[in-house]
Image (cartoon, rainbow, N blue to C red):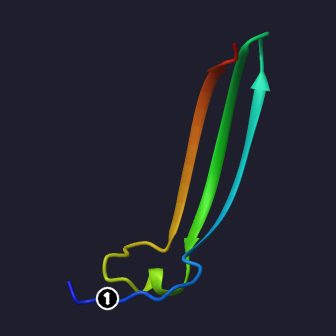
Amino acid sequence: MPVFSASSGINQLRFSIGGVYRFATHWNIGANIAFGWLRGDATDSPITEKTSQISYGLFCSYAF
């Protein structure tokens, strides 16, 4: 890999949305999704393969 020197600044923008639903007295279920975009020097790095990312998750929780 060639030498790479990144400067300071914003390296990522991210937008996310999620929700939670209580279906019983102590139990919840939920989901979230996030979209991220690399910015600035992060896009020029020799190890960067993609400049955007999507992540998502589902969860179940119990509240005491």
In the orientation shown, which residue stands out farthest toward the top?
25
Horizontal side, residue 5 vs residue 26: left or right: left
- Judging by the rendered image, the residue that carries numbered circle 1 is 4
Please tell me which residue is depicted at 58% across the width and 65% down the height of the picture.
Answer: 36
- Between 41 and 37, which is closer to the camera in this rendering? 41
The image shows residue 6 at horizontal and vertical percentages of 42, 87
Residue 8 vs 59, above or below: the answer is below
**Which quarter of the figure has residue 59?**
top right
The 10 Å Cα crowd at callout 1, few under 14, some 14 to 19, many 20 or more, is few
The image shows residue 12 at horizontal and vertical percentages of 57, 72
- Between 8 and 25, which is closer to the camera in this rendering? 8
Amino acid type, mark 1: Phe
Q: Secondary structure under badge 1?
A: loop
Please tell me which residue is depicted at 36% across the width and 89% down the height of the picture.
Answer: 5
Horizontal side, residue 12 vs residue 44: left or right: right
Residue 36 vs 59, above or below: the answer is below
The image shows residue 30 at horizontal and vertical percentages of 69, 31
Please tell me which residue is depicted at 55% across the width and 80% down the height of the picture.
Answer: 39
The image shows residue 45 at horizontal and vertical percentages of 37, 83
Q: Quadrant of the N terminus?
A: bottom left
Residue 18 vs 58, above or below: the answer is below
Residue 57 vs 42, above or below: the answer is above
Q: Quadrant of the C terminus?
A: top right
In the orientation shown, which residue stands out farthest toward the left?
1
Horizontal side, residue 44 vs residue 64: left or right: left
Please tell me which residue is depicted at 75% across the width and 38% down the height of the picture.
Answer: 19
**Which quarter of the figure has residue 21?**
top right
